[in-house]
Amino acid sequence: MQSIYWVLTWACHRKCAHCYDDRFRPYVRDALTNVVAEGQRTYKDVLANLPDDLTWYNPETKMREKTLMILAGGELLIDGVREELFYPALDAIQARYGDAAPLLSIQTTGDVLTPEILDTCLAKGITSISIASIDDYHSGMKGDRKFIFMEKIREMMASRGVQEVSLGGEKDERLKGPKQDIKAAPGAPTFLFFGAQPDLWIGELWPRGRAFANGLSEASYETNFCERWSGAKNFLHIGEAGSEISIEPNGNIFPCCLKTKSPLGSLAEERLEDIMSSVASLPAIQALNAGDPESMGLDQGWDRAFFRSQSTVKDGKGREVSNMCLGCDSFFDIKLSAQLRELRAERLAKKLSRKRGVDHFNRVRRAVNLHKRPHPRPL
C-alpha cells in the first residue's frame, strides 16, 4: 500500500462539531478503559494480517518506497491512550517489521503534545507529525489564536530538529513555515499543519458524522471524494501508487477515509490480501476502485440517473444535500452490504475448514510420533 490510515481508538479529548464520526469524543473512567481496550484487543492481529511487504512502486522514481502508516484517533497522546495503546502499538510495529517497518506518521491536535512526548514519539520511530487542528472548529483555535498556537509548535519542533513541510495551497502567509522554500533534509523527521479550512484541507467537509448532523457539509454532487487522495480510487492495487485503506479500532477495513456504510472485512480475522482479492470480484467494488461510485450499480439496474436520485437526503439542519457518498451509502444499504457479508462468511468458513484440516493432521502426526517413540528400557 502507498498509505494506511489506522484509527487506533475513538477516544478524544474533544467533541468537535465538524468531526466525521460521532464516536470520536471524550470518554471517562470505565468508558475510557473500555473504548481503549477495543484497540488493545486487536492491534496485534491487525499487524499480523497486514502484508509482510509494506512497500509500493513509485512510477516517478521507478523504485519501491516504504508505505506511509498514519496512526490516528481520536487523540493518541492523551492520558489513558498514550501509554496504554499508542506506545505499545509503535513497539509492536517495530517488532513485526524491524528495518522494513513502514514510515510512521501520527495525526494529533497538537495541544497535548509536550517536548517529552515528542521525544518518545521520535525514539519509537515516528517520522512525521500532522497537527490537524488549524481551523475555527477546534476549541481555542478560532481567529488569530491558531497562529499563536502554531508558533509554539514551531518552537517545540525546532528544539528537536523536526522540520516543517507543507501540504501546499496556503493563501494566508501566516500558515506557511518560515522556510517553506527549503526541502527537509533526507531522513529528517518532519511536521505539518492542516485543518478543516479551504487552504489547509478539503474545502468541503465530508458528509459524515457530526459535520453532517450539524449541517456543516458543503459538498455537492459534483464533489467526488472517491477520486481524491484518501478516497477509494486505486485502493485495490496493493503495492502500487494511490493504494490506501482505512482501519478502525476493531480491525474493520474500508476503501476510503470517509468510510463506506459497511466494512470490507476485518484484519482482526483475516489477512488483507485475502479480503481484497475476495471483494475485488464485485463490480461495485471495482467501480469504487476506479473512483467512479456513480457506476457501482450498473450491473444491478442502478444506472447513473437512478444512482443520483438515491444520493439526496436531508442533513441535521433539514437541508436537502446531494453527494455521491450518500448515493454510495444507499447502494450499500440496499445491495452491497449483504453481498460483503456473504463473501466474509464464505472466507471465514474456508478458513475454519483449513484450520480443522491442519489440526487433524497435527493430531495424527503426534499420535504417529508417540507410537514410534522407543519404550523405556527396564533397569
Image: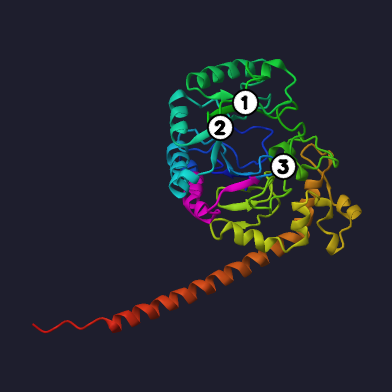
Q: Position of residue 279 (x, y in %)?
A: 69, 61
Left/right placement of residue 317 relative to residue 84 reads: right
What residue appears at the point 47 percent right and 48 percent down from the top-left corner? 97
Image disc number at residue 208: 3
Residue 48 covered by magenta stretch: yes
* Badge 3 element: loop
Q: Amino acid at mark 3?
A: Arg
Q: Are marks 1 and 2 in contact (CB under 8 Å)?
A: yes
Q: Quadrant of residue 267?
A: bottom right
Query: Rounded to the nearest whole Å, what is the CA distance between mark 2 and mark 3?
Result: 27 Å
What residue appears at the point 34 percent right and 82 percent down from the top-left corner? 368
- The residue where tag 1 is placed is 165
Q: Position of residue 137 (x, y in %)?
A: 68, 27
Span shown in magenta? 34-57
Badge 2: residue crowd in 10 Å (few <14, some 14–19, many ≥20): many
Rendered view: 356 above or below 209: below
Residue 324 covered by magenta stretch: no
Residue furthest toward the left?
Answer: 379
Labels 1 and 3: the sequence-earlier one: 1
Q: Quadrant of residue 270?
A: bottom right
* Badge 1 element: loop
Query: Rounded to the nearest whole Å, what is the CA distance between mark 1 and mark 3?
Result: 29 Å
Q: Amino acid at mark 1?
A: Val
What residue appears at the point 43 percent right and 31 percent down from the top-left corner? 120
Q: Amino acid at mark 2?
A: Ser
- The residue where tag 2 is placed is 128
Rendered view: 84 above or below 135: below
